[in-house]
Amino acid sequence: MNVILDQWDLRLGSDVMHFMESSVRESERVVIICTPKYAEKANSGMGGAGYEKMIVTGEIYHHQQSTKFIPLLRRGSKDSGLPTYLKSKNYIDFTDDSKFATKFDELLRDILNVPLRPKPKLGVSKFAMSEKKAETPMSDEVITYCSRCGVLPATQSICIGMYTQHDFVYDQGVIFCNRCGQFVGRKTMCIGMYSLHDFRSGNGSEFCNRCGIAIGQRSTCTGMYTHHNFVSKPAGKVEFRFSDQ
């Protein structure tokens, strides 16, 4: 991770205002360290804090939903330490030195987009499950299969094309080839200019956006393409919750 810091990157004789503008504009994330003194200067428009406020508020105005700017509260409380233009932003609290390592890990994970508790994948509607159960190998369990030919491990066989060895992987859900629509489960070759499949996991709603065919029906596509390009139907906004009771 490349960090821009004035102590490292601002040389003697450099234009300070240009450095501030270009650094804020060109950085993917900007950490703003907040204290009551900084908040006082920013709110009154004094010095570098006031000029920084002008630059940041300009970007926030044009990109209001952006998460680019991260307020880091180092001293004081939310009311006293955060300037007015940052009070609506979700901030990280670094006021307790005993929790510094934990908070620093939290900050790095957010910047690098590696959450400690990632959001689980959206499940499949039971209505869709019941409609597809007879024709698609939908499974909540992990399926192990060869990523090249689709065969399941159990019987001794060689792979296809220029490969003699399988490449077994595992995934969950409806596993199908994005080029020909074939489900995993038996050894086959792909179509057109390909001998190897391009298997991926879906939820059973996929269809080819070139010819409209559904997955599970092994075929070639139309026009200048021999392979399909399957996409998933957009998920609805209604969330169904089921209970065993």
Image (cartoon, rainbow, N blue to C red):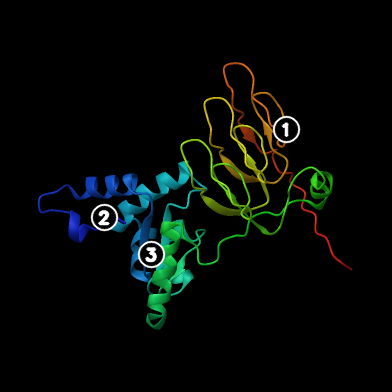
Q: Which amino acid does label 2 sit on?
A: Ile
Q: Which residue lies furthest to the left in this view?
A: 13
Q: In this view, does 195 lie to the left or right of 74?
A: right
Q: Reading the chain from its start, which is encountered first: label 2 or label 1?
A: 2
Residue 106 in percent (x, y) is at 44, 68
User: Which residue is labeled 1 in the image?
Assistant: 217
Q: Is residue 71 left or right of residue 187?
A: left
Q: Which mark is residue 115?
A: none
Q: Which mark is residue 4?
A: 2
Quadrant containing the N terminus is bottom left
Quadrant containing the C terminus is bottom right
Mark 1 Cα within 10 Å, few/some/many (few <14, many 20+)?
Answer: few
Q: In this view, does 6 lie to the left or right of 116?
A: left
User: Which residue is labeled 3 in the image?
Assistant: 39
Residue 14 in percent (x, y) is at 14, 48
Q: Give the label, 2 or 1, closer to the camera.
A: 1
Q: Which element type, helix, strand or loop, lies under badge 3?
A: helix
Residue 153 in percent (x, y) is at 61, 54
Q: Which of 163 and 49 is in front in this view?
A: 163
Question: Which residue is found at the position 63% from the left and 51% from the top?
Answer: 152
Q: What residue type is labelled 3?
A: Ala
Q: Which element type, helix, strand or loop, lies under badge 2?
A: loop
Q: Which of 104 and 227 is in front in this view?
A: 227
- Gap in angstroms between the C-alphas marked 2 and 1: 54 Å
Mark 3 Cα within 10 Å, few/some/many (few <14, many 20+)?
Answer: many
- Gap in angstroms between the C-alphas marked 3 and 2: 22 Å
Residue 75 against residue 192 in the figure, above or below: below
Q: Residue furthest bottom?
A: 98
- Gap in angstroms between the C-alphas marked 3 and 1: 63 Å
